[in-house]
Image: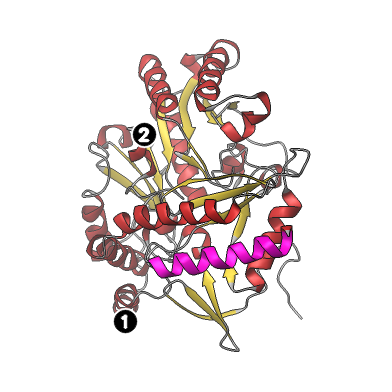
Amino acid sequence: MTQLSPLLKQATPVVASRGEGVYLYDDGGTRYLDFTAGIGVTSTGHCHPKVVAAAQQQVGTLIHGQYTTVMHRPLQQLTQRLSEVLPAGLDSVFFSNSGSEAAEAALRLARQATGRPNIVVFQGGFHGRTVAAASMTTSGTKFRAGFSPLMGGVVVSPFPNPSHYRRYGWDQDQATDFALRELDLLLNTQSAPADTAAFLVEPVLGEGGYVPGHERFFAGLRERADAHGILLIVDEVQTGFGRTGRFWGQDHFGLVPDIQMFAKGIASGFPISGIAASEQLMAKAWPGSQGGTYGANAVACAAALATLEVIAEEHLVENSQARGEQLRSRLREATQGYTQVAEVRGLGLMVGVEFINDDGTPGTALAAAVQQEAARRGLLLLTCGPWTEVVRFIPALVVSQQQVEDAAGIFSAALKAVLG
């Protein structure tokens, strides 16, 4: 009998039979409050009626029109619609299927456009599991171990992560100073500017622990990139489409990329991703270097169009900001007095609770125990962080005030059950 790979471990015990909004239901009808959203994918909730209708209509019209063979209307319409939400000047897009493919496309464009070999990435970043994407990922060894040699030309610089530098007594500003000094050292000792094609960075570390960046740090990246002709790639795969309470995570920091990656929340669960750049920059990619069988699938494009309409019509970016503030406030109340909770942090509906042991070491087992206890009580959560010591909250952007209250109440009960 064929079975799934034993390496595919479920984070929760749920076998979902249907979904509606922020809820999942199993075969027995048990309802779970889903604060995972398919790892930040189902931005408009499970089976939003408008997205369902768009996908159903498209399935009955054209399922797949390979976009280097024929053109189709959903692709043309999505390309036009993205011009309304992408940063000014990023007027050319290439579509693919996953975040990893977007990372590979951004890497390829940067190297071909500049003629330079190296990419500087930042400690704790996650950019995918394919070989090149994993080579640029430093959020955990599980994503890159066991299939060396990895791709060359990747150099790692510090990210201003206060949770990591807490052990040294540093605050955000001190961590930022250190990160920028180390980047300058790197450019003088490991990757000469003339060999450096791009900096690749997440506005908020995702798998790395839900750690927001810092405005001064990103300004420093932009300054150095401009001074040396280095491209700045921003990975908005998890932070885009309203997740952080702004349309793009970079909007919190005044960060302007040369190449922008996107995926996850764009199509409410249908696989589509891409990169955006200026037409002038995109034209520097080599002929034949962009393509793919399933990229810009017609049904996925239709779902993405509907998703963008729902985000606008239902003011989901604004809801993400308001509900995110509510969630962080309630989680801080729930965790008050627990010395095992180091921090509640995040932006919008991208919130992490970091656990530590009594000796200050990462609380891996604590985070796992609380996450599992919450699942038993009907709240689905995930973990992240270098030691999987962070419990993360990623509900759909349609989450209501009452649903946030319900989630905080369940989490509080799970904390009490595990920590006493």
Residue type, numbered disc 2 = Phe
Q: Is residue 148 left or right of residue 235?
A: right
**Number of numbered discs present?**
2
Q: Nearer the viewer, residue 149 or 373?
A: 373
Q: Where does residue 34 sit, x and y in percent of width and height?
A: 52, 69
Residue depicted at 73% across the width and 39% down the height: 148
Name the element at disc 1.
loop
- Location of residue 221 (image quadrant): top left
Residue type, numbered disc 1 = Gly
* Mark 1 Cα-neighbour bin, 10 Å: few <14, some 14–19, many ≥20: few
- Sequence order check: which comes first, mark 2 or mark 1? 1
Name the element at disc 2.
loop
**Position of 193 relative to 286 (above/below):** above
* Mark 2 Cα-neighbour bin, 10 Å: few <14, some 14–19, many ≥20: some
Q: Give the range drawn in magenta.
A: 401-418
Q: Is residue 22 left or right of residue 73?
A: right
Say if mark 2 contacts mark 1, CB within 8 Å: no
Q: On the rendered image, what quadrant is the C terminus found in? A: bottom right
Q: Mark 2 points at which residue?
A: 253
Q: Name the residue under label 1.
A: 60
Q: Is residue 407 magenta?
A: yes
Residue depicted at 29% across the width and 61% down the height: 311
- Location of residue 309 (image quadrant): bottom left
Q: Where does residue 372 sit, x and y in percent of width and height?
A: 69, 65
Residue depicted at 35% across the width and 45% down the height: 248
- Main structural element of the magenta stretch: helix, strand or loop? helix
- Location of residue 218 (image quadrant): top left
Residue farthest to the front? 337
Residue depicted at 55% across the width and 50% down the height: 352
Q: Which of 298 and 381 is in front in this view?
A: 381
